Amino acid sequence: MIVVLLGAPGSGKGTQGMPLAERFGLAHVASGDMFRDHLNAGSELGLLAKSYMDKGELVPDDVTIRMVLDRLSWRNAAKGVILDGFPRTLPQAEALDQALAGQSKRVDVVPYVVVSTDELLRRLGGRWICRATGHSYHVASNPPQTPGVCDLDGSELYQRADDSIDVARTRLQVYFEQTEPVVDYYRGRGVLTEVNGEQSIEQVYDELVHALEGSPVH
Ligand code: AMP
C-alpha cells in the first residue's frame, strides 16, 4: 500500500505519520526528517537543504525527488510506505507516479488533514519537538508533563527554527501556492480522503485509520 499523507505545516500529520505506519506495517518516509537527518550528519545535501528550510522555502525538486525515490527502493519500503511531506509540488507528484508505474504500483490512498489557516499559525507558533525521536507537543493544546522534557523518552524539547512566526507564514504561503495543486491532482484521481484535522489527536488518528482501511488494497 502506498499512502501519501497530505496536510499543511502544522496540520498534525507529523504526529500521526509514525503511529499510523506502525499500525499498518508500513515504512514512514518523511522528507523533512530526512533533510534534518542529513543536516545533523553534516552532509552536503543537509547544508543545501538548510539554506531553504531556514527561510521556509522548498528544497529544489531535483534533489528532493532523488532523495525520496532512492529511499523508496530500500528493502523495508517493499511492503508499502506512508509518505509524509512528499510530494509537495506537481513535478514531485508526477515523478512519484512515474517511478511507481515502473514497478506496477500506484498511490493508493491520500488522506488530507484539513485545518484552517488561523489554527495552523497558532499551532506552528507553540510547537515544541523532542530531540531524540521527533514527538511533537504544543504549549496550549498538548503540553508535556514537565516543560521542556519529552513525556515518552525524557529527552530535551526544542522549537524548530522554521517555526518562528515569520518563517511559519512563508511556509504556509509556499504550501498554498505549491502544494495545494497536489491536493487537486489527487482529488482528480479519486484517491483523496479529507480528514478533519481540528479534532483531538485520537479522533484524527481514528479517521486516518478508517481512511487507510477503506483503501482497496488494504
Ligand atoms: P517538514 O518537516 O515536512 O515541515 O519540512 C521541513 C522543510 O523541509 C520544508 O519547509 C522544506 O524546506 C523542506 N522539505 C521537506 N519536504 C520537502 C519536499 N517534499 N519538497 C521540498 N522541500 C521539502
Image (cartoon, grey):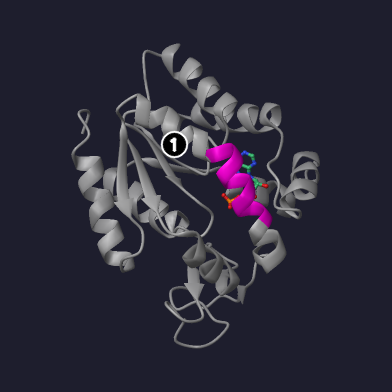
- In the image, 4: left or right of 131? left
Q: Nearer the viewer, residue 133 or 104?
A: 104
- In the image, 166: left or right of 89? right
Q: Nearer the viewer, residue 126 or 20?
A: 126
Which residue corresponds to the image point at 44% horizontal and 59% vertical from the top-left?
116
Magenta region, residue range: 170-179
- In the image, 121: left or right of 190? right
- In the image, 135: left or right of 201? right
Count the labels in the image.
1
Residue 188 sits inside the magenta stretch: no
Which quarter of the rendering shows the C terminus?
Answer: top left
Q: Quadrant of residue 178?
A: top right
Regarding mark 1 in the picture, which secondary structure is present there? Answer: helix
Can I make out residue 134 in this image? yes
The majority secondary structure of the magenta stretch comes to helix
Farthest residue to the bottom: give it. 146
Give coordinates of residue 201: x percent, y percent: 33, 66
Q: What kind of residue is marked 1?
A: Val
Crowdedness near tag 1: few (<14), some (14–19) or many (≥20) residues, C-alpha within 10 Å: many
Give coordinates of residue 167: x percent, y percent: 70, 60
Please tell me whether residue 106 is drawn above or below residue 140 in the rendered image. Answer: above
Which residue corresponds to the image point at 45% horizontal and 11% vertical from the top-left?
102
Give coordinates of residue 22: x percent, y percent: 33, 50
Which quarter of the rendering shows the N terminus?
Answer: top left
Give coordinates of residue 49: x percent, y percent: 74, 44
Which residue corresponds to the image point at 43% horizontal and 60% vertical from the top-left?
15
Please tell me whether residue 16 is drawn above or below residue 108 in the rendered image. Answer: below
Q: Which residue is mark 1?
A: 183
Please tell me whether residue 163 is drawn above or below residue 37 in the rendered image. Answer: below
Q: Quadrant of residue 187?
A: top left
